[in-house]
Amino acid sequence: MVSNDLGQEPTTEAGGADLEALLQEGYGFTPLKRGEVREGVIVSIGSSEILIDLSGKTEGVVAGRELERMPKEMLDSIKVGDEVLAYVVNPEDKNGNIVLSLTRAQLEKDWREAERLFEAQEMFSGHVAGFNKGGLIVRLGKVRGFVPASQLDSNRHPRLNEAGLTPEERWGELTGETLQLKVIEIDRERNRLILSERAAMREWRQMQKEKLLADLTEGEIRKGKVISLADFGAFVDLGGADGLIHLSELSWKRVNHPREVLRVGDEVEVYVLNVNRERRRIGLSLKRLQPDPWTLVDEKYNVDQLVEGVITKLAKFGAFACIVGDEEIEGLIHISELSEDHIAHPKEVVQENQVVTLRIIRIDTDQRRMGLSLKRVDQAEYADLDWQAELAASEEESADAADGAEPETEPALQPETLELQDEAQLESAEPVDEAQPESVEPVDETQPESPEPVAEAQPESVEPVDEAQPESPEPVAEAQPESVEPVDETQPGSAEPVDEATDDDELAADEDSEKPAADSVEETAVEVVVE
């Protein structure tokens, strides 16, 4: 034992401390403590134990139950010479061996990693291993982490806020997915590790927004997804950065709320309206990708023209109305143009959704403004103008109707019709010529036989003949002398066969009902032929 300068021996405690310090200085080794984690190198791997060098010529062993508990994947992944972390289960057992554990060391390593992530506030990717009533379970190595429902990104999980769902329905489809997470709370003593997707996505979007702000240019067209709706517009995710479509940029016509045009989850193409890199804001537009209806206003509408309009909104200073058929075109009816009388509010004259006739009093296509009037619709100074407009409209309608009716007024088969008419005339003339030579003699011979064929050919002529029977003998007798004169001037007997056939047909049809009348007509016809 070495004495000090005063010749006194050092105390036992001081000697132990000096020995420990001497070991650390000379060999770089500190005594092992239970629960401590040390770095080591695998020296050998056997069927019953694994030998690990902890430096300082100190070796520990992994054996027994600890070796049995090790997963097969872990055993297959390690080999001699690998550097590993070893957990000190017992600094010295009854046999003088240092008992170590690799699985506990891995758990310790994961806790250290979780502490590092928490201190650095870094993001990491985690796989959803399961779920419970309150949220998702994500493992960080061997450490079990928990993601509460309040820390999930509702934009990525639409069913998060749906009511009446079971945990299986709410979280089942997320099992196995990869989430971007951050550690927001850690407590090793309570075995507590709280993770957050919202915090991670907030940071990730910020990074993406910085990148997009540097790349985006005004006038560019991008695809995005509607993630939320507000009273003033719709937010669209462009792939990490959110842009706003203001209510006025959703459509050319009036929109009271974005849900009239869009729904959450819709995939849309948007026009990059402006990029503010200082305030880190992106303005988007949906209507700029649609045709501008105001470019055709000057062609379709004129000042003093009457139009049908629908009241869309009331304000203190007037009422807004859109044109029927062109709902994208909206004009203002100033309160002074609503009535000849003084009114305090437009609701005294019109109501929303009311259809009224209006007169255009001003058009400003550059500012996309149109002035309308209700009180000037019936004013006398516009009577002549309205009459001319109505006349022009009616003439235009008549011209359109005439254009549409032209194919119907001109028969497509007119030449064939003329040919048929000519053939009919020829056919009608030929039998007359053939019958002329025989017109005198066959009269007496055919009269007894004429009733039978006439009755079969004209069954419908009985009713009108019955009504005129009392007067039939006189007109027949009067007509006969007139028919004789043209016969002498032209061709003999040309008119007689026609009259005889006509008289015979009428008399034959009524032969059974009026026999005396038929006999008198027959005698008269014979006399005419003899003359």
Image: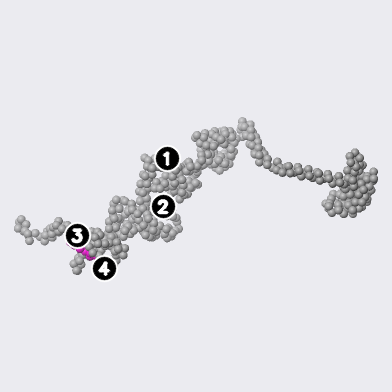
Kind of residue at badge 4: Ser
Indicate which label's residue lies in the foreground, 1 or 2.
1
Q: Is residue 386 left or right of residue 432?
A: left
Q: Give the mark, 1 or 4, whose residue is nearer the N terminus.
A: 4
Q: Position of residue 481 (x, y in %)?
A: 92, 42
Q: Closer to the camera, 101 or 404?
A: 404
Indicate which label's residue lies in the foreground, 1 or 4.
4
Labelled disc at residue 55:
3
Q: CA distance from mark 2 to mark 3?
A: 50 Å
Kind of residue at badge 2: Arg
Q: CA distance from mark 4 to mark 2?
A: 49 Å
Callouts 1 and 2 close, C-beta under 8 Å:
no
Callouts 1 and 3 close, C-beta under 8 Å:
no
Q: Position of residue 8 (x, y in %)?
A: 6, 58
Q: Is residue 179 left or right of residue 246?
A: left
Q: Is residue 349 left or right of residue 448?
A: left
Callouts 2 and 3 close, C-beta under 8 Å:
no
Q: SS class of the residue under badge 2?
A: loop
Q: Is residue 254 left or right of residue 1?
A: right
Q: SS class of the residue under badge 1?
A: loop
How would you rate the neighbour count of disc 3 (Cα within 10 Å): few for under 14, some for 14-19, many for 20 or more? Answer: some
Q: Which residue is mark 4?
A: 47
Q: Which residue is mark 2?
A: 156
Q: Give the mark, 4 or 3, whose residue is nearer the N terminus.
A: 4
Q: Position of residue 273 (x, y in %)?
A: 44, 40
